[in-house]
Image (cartoon, rainbow, N blue to C red):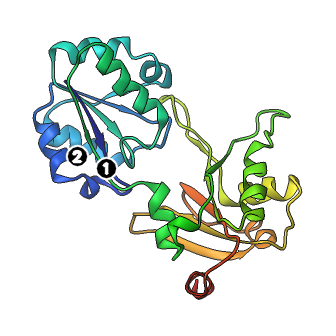
Amino acid sequence: MLTMIGLGLGGPNSITMDGVIALSMSDYIFYETYTSPIHSETLEWVKLKSQKEPIHLSRSQVEEPAELIEFAKEKMVALLIVGDALSATTHVSLLLDCKKNNIEYQVIHNASVLTAVAGILGLQHYNFGPVATLVLPEGNYRPLSPIDKIKSNMKNGNHTLVLLDIKADQPDKELIYMKASDAAEQIIEAGLSEEIKVAAAARVGRESQTLWYGKLKTLKELDLGEEPHSLVVPSRLHFTEKEFLESL
């Protein structure tokens, strides 16, 4: 059996009771870090409570899960995922693999940055268009499709949640995060006005959570501290949304 456990956005206190029970019943516990890094305190807590060493899976091992599927055929297997267990399409593919192999599965949901960022900024979820993801530059590689989504949403009067890229797939290598300031610079370079006002959220769901609202040109020079960071590019604001953002 495969149990996908959403860890939420904070440390071990964010794990739901259902998640705790599933961990106690698991023979093997795996985790991945390519969708989002796991809080170090969470891994330590899981190890202490389960008396099992969590095993790291690379992106390829999740997307081509032959080994994971083989374990799940005979044993109780848990896969730890930051946020909600099904926020990434790859994880839906895992469920399809279970179906094809007649493996029982369950999903334990939790809070996701996809909903938490909008809510904590006082924005209404139904006013959002498609999510955009900015990627870390590699050489001259700077895809424009995320910027096109922002422009399209603005034209349609919709806000854009902008997720920022991370390189956290290999535990033996230093984690690399895109900062809100890097994202602001990339958006300006792509042709959007530096006078546009945006909202930024850092470490949502943690005690050190920081929220900010202002112009892109200001954010470009701003340090919001430790990652992860996310942005929202607002469009047509309801008066309550506007009031909340300006209170930041």
Left/right placement of residue 85 relative to residue 135 reads left
Coordinates of residue 79 in the picture (x, y in percent):
30, 32
**Amino acid residing under circle 2:** Trp
Locate the C terminus by quadrant: bottom right
The structure residue drawn at horizontal position 32% and vertical position 37%, both measured from the top left corner, is 80
How many residues crowd mark 1 within 10 Å: few (<14), some (14–19), many (20+)?
few
Q: Which mark is residue 103?
A: none
Q: Position of residue 240 (x, y in %)?
A: 55, 86
Would residue 40 appear left or right of 71 to someone viewing this image? right
Quadrant containing the N terminus is top left
Q: Position of residue 199 (x, y in %)?
A: 64, 70
Verify CB contact (< 8 Å) between mark 2 and mark 1.
Answer: yes
User: Residue 161 placed where, x, y %?
Assistant: 61, 58
The residue nearer to you, when weighing 11 against 149, is: 149
Q: Relative to 35, does residue 122 appear above or below in the rendering?
A: below
Q: Residue at horizontal 87%, vertical 54%?
A: 189
Q: Residue at x 31, y 50 (%)?
A: 41
Residue 45 image label:
2
Q: Residue at x 57, y 81 (%)?
A: 241
Q: Secondary structure at mark 2?
A: helix
Q: Quadrant of residue 242?
A: bottom right
- Per the model, the C-alpha gap separating discs 2 and 1 is 6 Å
- Relative to 83, is 237 on the left or the right? right
Q: Amino acid at mark 1?
A: Glu
Identify the secondary structure beneath mark 1: helix
Crowding near the residue tagged with mark 2, few <14, some 14–19, many ≥20 C-alpha atoms within 10 Å: some
> In front here: 197 or 39?
197
Look at mark 1 in the image and give the residue it sits on: 41
